[in-house]
Amino acid sequence: MDNGKQQVVLRCGVCGKEGLHELHYAGRLLASAKCKSCGTIMRHTPRELRRTYIKDLQDRVTTKPHRLMRRLIMEPSYLWKGLPAALRRQPKKFIDEAKELKNVEKLQDEE
Ligand SMILES: [Zn+2]
């Protein structure tokens, strides 16, 4: 596993060049794409990312009780306070994704 990073050729919306972009993922979600030509980083805001992540999480655990999902939607911080028991079967995976989201937020806070 390549630590959530991947390189693809894309057309950059800023410099207009078609070239390598470094994609950074939080779980299955695209968190950012960095143009290797001009260095522009395009990404979701933490708020968007979290919302998308929770929606994605919801999609992944649709067989789980609705109560849990409603709680996550009403109170997204529940995700950080403690992993819902229903998700503990894959704790490392979810912890890694949560860390990845935290890293993205940290990077953005430093700007
Ligand atoms: Zn560029």
Image: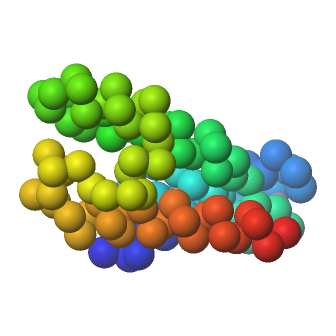
Please say which color scheme the image uses. Answer: rainbow
Task: Pinpoint residue 92: horizontal percent, then vertical percent.
Answer: 23, 69
Task: Pinpoint residue 57: horizontal percent, then vertical percent.
Answer: 33, 40
Residue 58: in sight, yes or no? yes
Image position of 14 (left or right of 50): right
The residue nearer to you, when weighing 33 against 38, is 33
Image position of 35 (left or right of 69): right
The residue nearer to you, when weighing 15 against 40, is 40
Task: Pinpoint residue 43: horizontal percent, then vertical percent.
Answer: 69, 52
The residue drawn where x is 63% and y is 57% is: 32
| Quarter of the image that includes the C terminus | bottom right
The residue drawn where x is 88% and y is 51% is: 14
Snapshot quadrant of residue 49:
top right
The residue drawn where x is 38% and y is 36% is: 72
Task: Pinpoint residue 31: horizontal percent, then vertical percent.
Answer: 57, 54
Image position of 86 (left or right of 3): left
Quadrant of the displayed image that contains ligand 1: bottom right
Asked if residue 84 is positioned above or below residue 63 in the image, the reply reads below
| Quarter of the image that includes the N terminus | bottom left
The residue drawn where x is 21% and y is 36% is: 61
Residue 22: in sight, yes or no? no
Asked if residue 37 is positioned above or below residue 28 in the image, the reply reads below
The residue nearer to you, when weighing 84 against 59, is 84
Furthest toward the right, the residue is 15
